[in-house]
Image (tube, grey):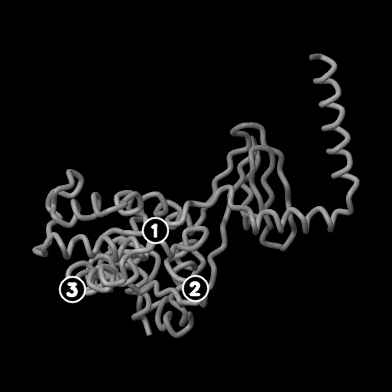
Amino acid sequence: MRGWNTSRSLRLRVAAAAVFMLPAGFALRGLAQHIETSTFNSSPLRPKEDPKAVARGKKAYEANCQSCHAADLRGGPGPSILRSQGALTDKNGENITAIIQGQDKMFPNHKYAISNDDSAAVAAFIRSNLALIGSQGRAPGDGTQKLNVVVGNAEHGKQYFEAKCASCHSAEGDLKGYAKKVSDPKTMQAAWLRGNHLGVPQPTIKVTVTQTGAKPVEGTLIHVDDFLVTLQLPDGSVKTIRRNGDIPKVVVKDPLEAHRNLWPVLADNDIHDITAYLVTLK
């Protein structure tokens, strides 16, 4: 048995060596082709739905569900169905119908005055859309559709903006005419989420370094980690100071910190509503 294992180990090492001896471009092309064609990590295909049930469900969905969950199921005032575990695991309406009829414990008040047959048809319509979800969580479709991110409530977005953002931004100040400067809502949403307001001057990050027995040194932060802090001084020169724990004292003043603090608490509805409000700033 030991001899077999030794021989097998030798064969594996020889095979591995052969792979590494291949030209890099050949190996990478082969890997890329394998990734593109591999079905190892693919979900099983959903069975096709009855077209008549889907058509009936589409009408019922538009009449009863679309105002909350959007035409593409991505959510508006209500949550995204594309990320609903109940919808994603539904096979024959057992989850979706229960939610529609208010029989699901997670959604006890979620009840529409539609028949069981219409509920089943809505479930079929939803499943038919989920079957079209693209790779990496793309919305249903073949990838050619233009994604509409303006699905929120602009008035709610204005209220959120005034409560959370007005201390730094103003619709009549730095964001005046913002929707003209950034006309693509998708680009706009991505920009404000990361604190990069396109068309608006970017604030600089300031830092103050105080060494023992020396005057504080102030400048524009270039880099900071547990070991070094690098800053540009007012005269344009660059200075790097070694750090050892809390010595020297480093105080960073980042105007975008408020944006980063929002990320953990921003709900989907907040993001949709703020974007809907920002596109009105013309």
Q: Residue at x 13, y 52 (%)?
A: 102
Question: Is 210 left, or right, of 269 in this rendering?
Answer: right
Expressed as whole percent of the image width and height from the top left, the position of residue 14 reads 88, 35
Quick check: marks 3 and 1 in contact, CB under 8 Å? no
The answer to which quarter of the image holds residue 271 is bottom left
Question: Is 104 left, or right, of 273 in this rendering?
Answer: left
Q: Earlier in the sequence, mark 1 or mark 2?
A: 1
The correct choice, above or below, for 135 with respect to 13 in the image is: below
Q: Identify residue for label 2.
A: 187
Q: Identify residue for label 3.
A: 63
Instruction: In this rendered view, identify the residue nearer to me: 241 or 95.
Output: 95
Identity of the amino acid at label 2?
Thr
The correct choice, above or below, for 120 with respect to 4 in the image is: below
Instruction: In this rendered view, identify the residue nearer to me: 166 or 118.
Output: 118
Question: Between marks 3 and 2, how big is the CA–CA gap?
Answer: 31 Å
Q: Earlier in the sequence, mark 3 or mark 1?
A: 1
Q: Identify residue for label 1.
A: 47
Kind of element beneath mark 3: helix
Q: Earlier in the sequence, mark 3 or mark 2?
A: 3
